[in-house]
């Protein structure tokens, strides 16, 4: 009370809100006026931020926290009354006629799309000190994830505008959600690389704020242990992306400029964009308001399962059930073995890869009702079974894939299952944890993420008619993986399966020890027999035919132990480095037609 004179009228209002909501303890240790006054003002700056960044402000946050903490104390299951069953969705096989048709439909629609990358997480499980989008997706070219994503979006933009001349926007925007942990480093990565070829105005960064920590079941906000004039905060989760798109006005801008789709994606999946054109085609053809991409999922794998939930009162929804909740939900509803593989070797519930495609119109309509707030959860670690005290402070969390939970039953919510080999290979686990993954389950490490790219590109070329040699098995950082030829291309070369198929003719073959880097839109492989390394770069105006027998000692993978600190972290976490012993390298910067035959 004696500090009131220091405060502006707005700050007095905020203080009142805190007091009315049972937060008087935040002021108990405040010193007399004249001492720490700057810090007291900084306290209110923080309260202002916490209020404005949460739909409904701190009052709403505290109210929801009390309700969720009360539910958690009595052990209420959020899925009480619901029975899970296996939903049906669109199942796509890479390269099939249906797949190719969807790809074309997706490329047509792409110019009306906007992409949203959620990249606010630090990836503690990976144990990498940098931001995850700066990690190389593969080490043959060293292209980092962010560059890889931007190049795909630009390739889609070009292809879409070529296919549908004059029919809508000509630039595909990209929004990136960052957090205090990742923001500055993301800005720096973009600025120091000229935005990887995108126009700076095409990219918008939206920074998510952390939320207040909670000390007890009454939702008393936690004081920061380092600073008594600060509320302790923690990340709220990727679900913040919805309120940020809404409150920033970006969604409205996209909608007003005639866009139809928003595509959400995560920070480290080097395969994802191989699935994007077809998945967007599925959304457009089936007129899905919400389309979640999924892959076959091993039981207990740490990705959510997509399930149809039917309530006793008749309500149903198709929704992601997070991996730690699926098993208890199944056990509690007549499946005593819980989450187990079926005779196919996979869980009957497809795995959510958190790649979501929303139709903007219905999405905007829903957000104008909710302000972008979505269903949250709380996960307190209790001191004992009385559940009266926490081991450490907790907070509310939210996930972007929970958006459909509040949708009316008439909403068209679908999903598309893709084979994992071309759609999903995230980089989440550190080498030690990855090596402990049960045999047969994916490692989700930097090693497996990179190997998956080589495997997918080899399999795609096989489907396109190239004789690609079988892989060998090798152990890197304690993880046994398949080592395929290291084939990498830029998105503008191989955006869709049909565009790849059109660039291959005659009898082509690639041996297991080979490396092939294709960087150029108009590079054609004809009767190529590759046994070694080939790197070819060509300007868009150059048309290059590559063929004949190319042999050299190539690029060799050499083991690196993840504990060997003489190597940079991004090399250690994958367990190998590339010795570029010998290669045929050709750069064609001039326009014209060229033939490359040794
Ligand atoms: N992220 C943010 O942008 N902000 C945050 O506060 C937190 C994360 P994780 P998670 O596909 O493998 C999700 O930590 O949450 C970004 C799905 O919930 O990698 O354990 C972060 O930068 C799960 O159903 O994943 O699990 C990253 O880009 C399953 O689909 C993204 O959010 C799983 O991903 C995901 O964060 C998966």
Image (cartoon, helix red, strand yellow):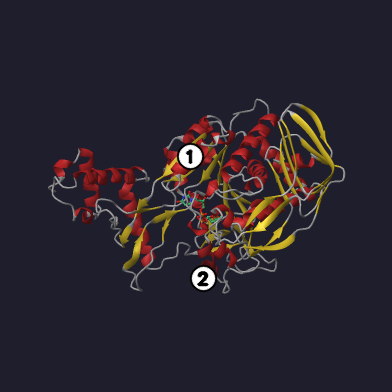
Left or right side of 592 for 393? left
Residue that carries the numbered disc 2 in the rendered image: 332
Count neighbours of disc 2 (C-alpha within 10 A) and say few if under 14, some if 14 to 19, many if 20 or more: some
Does residue 89 appear anywhere in the picture? Answer: no
**Residue 14 appears in which quarter of the rendering?**
top left
Give the quadrant of residue 86.
bottom right
Q: Is residue 359 visible?
A: yes
What's the mark number on residue 188? 1
Q: Residue at point 73% right, 55% down?
A: 484
Residue 549 horizontal side relative to residue 156, left or right: right
Residue 9 figure quarter: top left
459 to 174, vertically: above or below: below
Q: Secondary structure at mark 2?
A: loop
Nearer to us in this view, 194 or 49: 194
The x and y percentages for residue 334 are 56, 72
Residue 339 image offset from top left, x and y in percent? 58, 68
In this view, the mark in front (1 or 2): 1
- How many labels were placed on the picture? 2
**Which residue is at 67% across, 35% downward?**
108
Q: Earlier in the sequence, mark 1 or mark 2?
A: 1
Residue 195 percent location from the top left of the image: 54, 35
**CA–CA distance in space, label 1 to label 2:** 49 Å
- Residue at image position (71%, 38%) is 493
């Amino acid at each position: 009370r004696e500090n009131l004179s220091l405060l502006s009228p707005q700050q007095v209002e905020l203080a009142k809100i805190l007091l009315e909501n049972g937060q008087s303890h935040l002021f108990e240790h405040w010193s007399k006026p004249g001492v720490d006054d700057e810090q007291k003002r900084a306290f209110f700056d923080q309260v202002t931020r916490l209020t404005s960044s949460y739909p409904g402000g701190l009052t709403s946050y505290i109210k929801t926290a009390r309700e969720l903490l009360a539910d958690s104390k009595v052990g209420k299951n959020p899925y009480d009354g619901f029975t899970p069953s296996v939903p049906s969705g669109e199942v796509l096989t890479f390269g099939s006629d249906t797949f190719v048709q969807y790809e074309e439909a997706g490329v047509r629609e792409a110019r009306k799309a906007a992409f949203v990358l959620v990249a606010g997480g630090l990836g503690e499980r990976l144990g990498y000190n940098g931001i995850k989008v700066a990690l190389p997706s593969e080490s043959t070219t060293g292209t980092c994830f962010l560059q890889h994503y931007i190049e795909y979006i630009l390739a889609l933009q070009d292809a879409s505008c070529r296919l549908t001349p004059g029919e809508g926007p000509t630039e595909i925007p990209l929004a990136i959600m960052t957090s205090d942990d990742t923001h500055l480093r993301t800005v720096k990565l973009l600025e120091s690389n000229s935005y990887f070829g995108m126009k700076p105005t095409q990219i918008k960064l939206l920074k998510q704020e952390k939320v207040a920590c909670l000390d007890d079941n009454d939702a008393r906000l936690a004081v920061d242990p380092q600073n008594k004039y600060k509320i302790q905060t923690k990340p709220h989760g990727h679900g913040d992306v919805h309120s940020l798109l809404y409150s920033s006005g970006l969604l409205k801008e996209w909608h007003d400029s005639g866009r139809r789709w928003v595509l959400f994606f995560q920070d480290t999946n080097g395969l994802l964009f191989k699935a994007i054109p077809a998945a967007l085609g599925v959304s457009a053809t089936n007129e899905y308001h919400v389309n979640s991409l999924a892959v076959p999922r091993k039981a207990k794998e740490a990705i959510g399962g997509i399930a149809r939930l039917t309530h006793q009162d008749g309500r149903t929804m198709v929704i992601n059930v997070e991996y730690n909740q699926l098993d208890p939900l199944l056990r509690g509803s007549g499946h005593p073995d819980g989450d187990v593989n079926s005779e196919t070797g996979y869980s009957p519930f497809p795995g959510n890869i958190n790649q979501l495609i929303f139709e903007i119109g219905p999405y905007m309509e829903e957000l104008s009702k909710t302000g972008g707030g979505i269903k949250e959860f709380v996960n307190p670690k209790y001191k004992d079974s009385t559940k009266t005290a926490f081991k450490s402070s907790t907070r509310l969390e939210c996930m972007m894939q929970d958006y459909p939970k509040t949708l009316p039953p008439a909403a068209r919510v679908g999903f598309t299952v893709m084979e994992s080999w071309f759609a999903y290979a995230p980089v989440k686990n550190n080498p030690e944890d990855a090596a402990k993954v049960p045999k047969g389950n994916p490692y989700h490490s930097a090693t497996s993420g990179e190997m998956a790219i080589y495997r997918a590109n080899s399999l795609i070329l096989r489907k396109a008619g190239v004789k690609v040699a079988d892989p060998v098995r090798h152990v890197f950082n304690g993880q046994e993986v398949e080592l395929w030829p290291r084939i990498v291309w830029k998105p503008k070369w191989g955006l869709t399966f049909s565009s790849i198929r059109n660039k291959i003719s005659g009898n082509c073959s690639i041996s297991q020890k080979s490396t092939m880097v294709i960087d150029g839109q108009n590079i054609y492989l004809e009767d190529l027999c590759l046994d070694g390394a080939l790197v070819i770069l060509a300007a868009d105006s150059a048309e290059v035919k590559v063929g004949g027998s190319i042999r050299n000692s190539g690029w060799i993978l050499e083991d690196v132990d993840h504990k060997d600190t003489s190597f940079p972290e991004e090399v250690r976490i994958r367990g190998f480095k590339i010795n570029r012993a010998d290669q045929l390298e050709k750069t064609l910067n001039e326009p014209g037609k060229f033939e490359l035959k040794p």
